[in-house]
Image: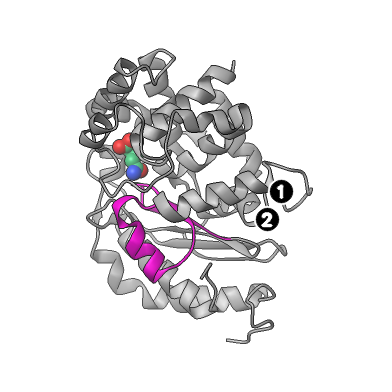
Amino acid sequence: MATTDPSGAGQSRRDYQSVLNWIEKKIQPELTKGRVATYIPALARVPKSKFAMAVYGIDGSVAAIGDADEPFSIQSISKVFTLMMALRQMGTHLWQRVGREPSGNRFNSLVQLEYEKGIPRNPFINAGAHVVTDCVLAHEPKGRQAILQEMRLLAKNRKIYFDREVARSERETGHWNAAIAHFLKAHGNLRGDVDKVLDAYFHQCSIAMSCHDLARAGLFLANGGRDVGTGDAVTTAQRAKRINALMMTCGLYDAVGNFAFHVGIPAKSGVGGGILGIIPGVLTVAVWSPGLDGSGNSLAGVKALELFTTRIGKSVF
Ligand code: GLN
């Protein structure tokens, strides 16, 4: 691979493309190893053979492989964007209602929430995301639609949509999330109507986006909070730094330590098999492979990101 700049920041589109082409071959044996999420039919029927990656550099470079234009269920990756919205609305007041420590538990743990008296460990476990969504709804007259609009704006794609089937089955099977939300309400940490918060949460999880969309939508996090095209502030540089820090420490649930060890970048995963990774000051990388590991993270996705950061010689460490 031709490297134009040892820091990696100056790597050209062609360099990233050749790295992705190499990963596409290398990753094939991994695609069969994971288990597709089965808690709702719409996720259970996604073929395990699907694989895609897209890389967007803050210098305008773009590279992609596989089904990178095909929308998939972003699920918990949406939590990054609702967090950004809640911080915009409430600033540091948000931190009175949600913590900033890794959970070391599964993403939907109830036990931990009981020990910690209704203050979720961080905004990326389900309990924390419910509080964040409650905050967003309190400030947004358009309700859940505001979340979709934000995603369309950031990804520069007006076709991004709520997958109604996914949202409906999330609600039908969402007893665990409902338990978390009611528990938060009992502790006074959910201000709005529980059903409205759950409805918005299930819809944000159901948003369908492609790897191209996700990598574009996250680009402000690699660019000090600013839109790469216009230079306008999406969020402040400090908040971008903090969101990246939370992705680094909490973005892959109880597998976050291993991910930092092997991949070494801030990232957020979802049970749809997507992962969005950020290399601050350089690029975003989105990967999609529906087969999950035991922690609910894309098995081949994690491996592909490890190959990527290793091959380009760039991480936050
Ligand atoms: N909809 C899923 C849930 O709430 C999202 C979880 C995830 O992507 N980790 O359980």
**To which residue does mark 2 refer?**
223
> What type is the residue that disc 2 sits on?
Asn
- Residue 47 higher or lower than 258, as above or below: above
Image coords of residue 48 (percent x, y)? 29, 57
Give the Cα distance between marks 1 and 2.
6 Å
Mark 2 crowd level (few <14, some 14–19, many ≥20, 10 Å Cα): many
Rendered residue at 72%/53% (across/down): 228
Residue at point 27%, 38% (across, down): 108
Task: Point out the quarter of the image occupied by ligand 1.
Answer: top left
Please state the extent of the stretch shown in magenta in the rendering.
Answer: 251-279
Residue 158 visible to the viewer: no
In this rendering, the answer to whether 33 lies above or below 120 is below
Question: Residue tagged by mark 1?
Answer: 226
In this view, the residue farthest toward the top is: 193
Q: Quadrant of the N terminus?
A: bottom right
Q: Which mark is residue 100?
A: none
Q: Nearer the viewer, residue 184 or 269?
A: 184
